[in-house]
Image (spheres, grey):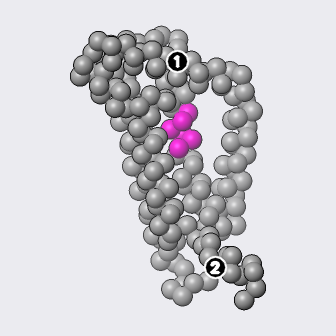
Amino acid sequence: MDFYSTVFSTIDLRSFSNIWFWIAVAVGWSNLTHFIIGVPFDMVLRARRRGGQALADLEALTLIQARRRVQIMHSSGVWLVAFWAGVLSALAVLGFGYGAELAQAMTLLLLPMTIAAAIGLRLANRLVADPLAGAALTRKLTLHRLGLQAIGLLAILITTMWGTWHNLSIPLMGR
């Protein structure tokens, strides 16, 4: 067995049957739904329960994170969007056009996360244009999190169905 065969037999590029891929899916969506435009959701819950300084901290951090995201998009958003669209397009073509399983898995992971990030950027733009405070802010962040969870649930369902179909369609003893 030569060096490349040893390396590629150790690093399995099949994704849908690899536990590490599913751990990455779980960790990715967990992080995405916990940090609402960069604000930890436990901070939202604490501000809703306690009010006072916790609410003031939430309002300040939310506005800081929203302004930060909007500033990044104003300064280099066109380049970021163009680059990311190219990456996603390449992954989609490699995965679904040429049948590369790793590219399929990355597309099914990153495309819904990109949609979720775009929705978060829209929320950031709204918060910068019209800052919310108090209960209105905690409600908006909670509803945004609920929307992200719905997107994540649908994305995981589709990824699971595609991965199951893919695993059932390949021969049992490998390729």
Write down the quadrant of residue 82 in the picture. top right
Residue 96, given in percent of the width and then of the height, sits at: 64, 62
The three-letter amino acid code for the residue at tag 2 is Ser
Q: Position of residue 169 (x, y in %)?
A: 52, 78
Decide which of tag 1 and tag 2 comes sooner along the chain: 2
Q: Nearer the viewer, residue 29 or 166?
A: 29
Q: Residue at x 55, y 33 (%)?
A: 118
In this orientation, does residue 141 appear? Answer: yes
Q: Nearer the viewer, residue 6 or 18?
A: 6
Residue 86 in the image, given as x and y percentages of width and height: 73, 46
Q: Callout 1, which amino acid?
A: Ile
Please say if the residues under marks 1 and 2 sit with CB atoms less than 8 Å apart: no
Q: SS at mark 2?
A: helix
Please tell me which residue is depicted at 45% across the width and 69% down the height of the picture.
Answer: 164
Tell me, for residue 9, which label it has, or none. Answer: 2
Question: Position of 9 compared to 31: left or right?
Answer: right
Q: Residue at x 69, y 42 (%)?
A: 85
How many labels, in total? 2
Residue 115 covered by magenta stretch: yes
Q: Is residue 163 visible?
A: no
Q: Which residues are magenta?
A: 113-118
Report the residue at 35% width, 27% height from top: 43
* Residue 15, above or below 136: below
The dominant secondary structure in magenta is: helix
- Say left or right for 86 vs 48: right
With 112 as the anchor, is 97 left or right in this view?
Answer: right
Q: In the rendered image of this protein, does residue 1 appear above or below residue 75?
A: below
Asked where in the image residue 93 lies, by quadrant, the reply is bottom right
Which residue is label 1 attached to? 64
